[in-house]
Amino acid sequence: MSTSERVVFSLAVLLLGSSLALAEDRKLGTPITEADIKALNITILPDGTNLPAGKGTAAEGAKIFAEKCMACHGEGGKGGPFATLVSDAPLKGNGIEAPKTIKNFWANATTVYDYIRRAMPWPGPRTLSDEEVYSLVAYILASNKIIDADAEMNAQTLPKVKMPNRDNFIIRFPDKI
């Protein structure tokens, strides 16, 4: 081993040793608890698995939308600085360039719930209650004329909503479903 190789090896050992000491000092690598995992495991599956208790209506959702969502998504979800949520624009016709909305693109209503609960409102994600999320989903679905305006969304009704574009997706691994 040459002198330069010994120096590089010594530096690597020194860095590894100091990294391990730092990790131990900061308690890195502490096992995660079941409670920690449960708090992070909020994924809602297309069939409704993991939907929480709660319920909401479009009327309740309209109030929440006006207060917490309209600044980004525009009045009635019809366009603002961020994504348009409500539109009758088909993906057919002007094709891939058409704005992708809840009605013309999303395959599952449960995914709408999952996304809103996980990522909205900006910049304070995960601050909505489960009932607020059900209400917002009901409002957006009713505004897109996917459900009746007086329909109640909950863990039983939401997975039964048939989204208009549901059958236009190719499932890559159908045996995994």
Image: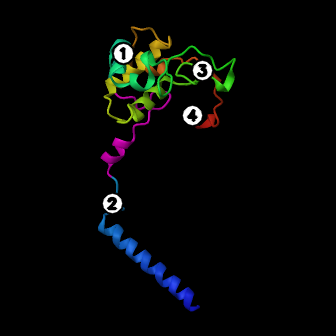
Classed neighbour count for the residue bearing mark 4: other residues with Cα under 10 Å, few (<14), some (14–19), many (≥20)? few
Q: Nearer the viewer, residue 54 or 67?
A: 67
Residue 20 percent across, percent down from the top left: 38, 72
- Give the residue number, with chain letter if any, for mark 4: 177
Q: Specify the amino acid type for callout 3.
A: Asn
- Tell me if I can see residue 103 in this picture: yes
Residue 93 percent across, percent down from the top left: 69, 17
Q: Nearer the viewer, residue 157 or 80?
A: 80
Measure the C-alpha gap from mark 1 to mark 4: 34 Å
Give whichever of discs 2 and 4 has the lower sequence position. 2
Whether residue 41 is situated above or below residue 23 in the rendered picture: above
- Give the residue number, with chain letter if any, for mark 1: 62
The magenta stretch is: 33-52
Number of numbered callouts drawn: 4
- 17 inside magenta stretch: no
Whether residue 31 is situated above or below residue 75 in the rendered picture: below
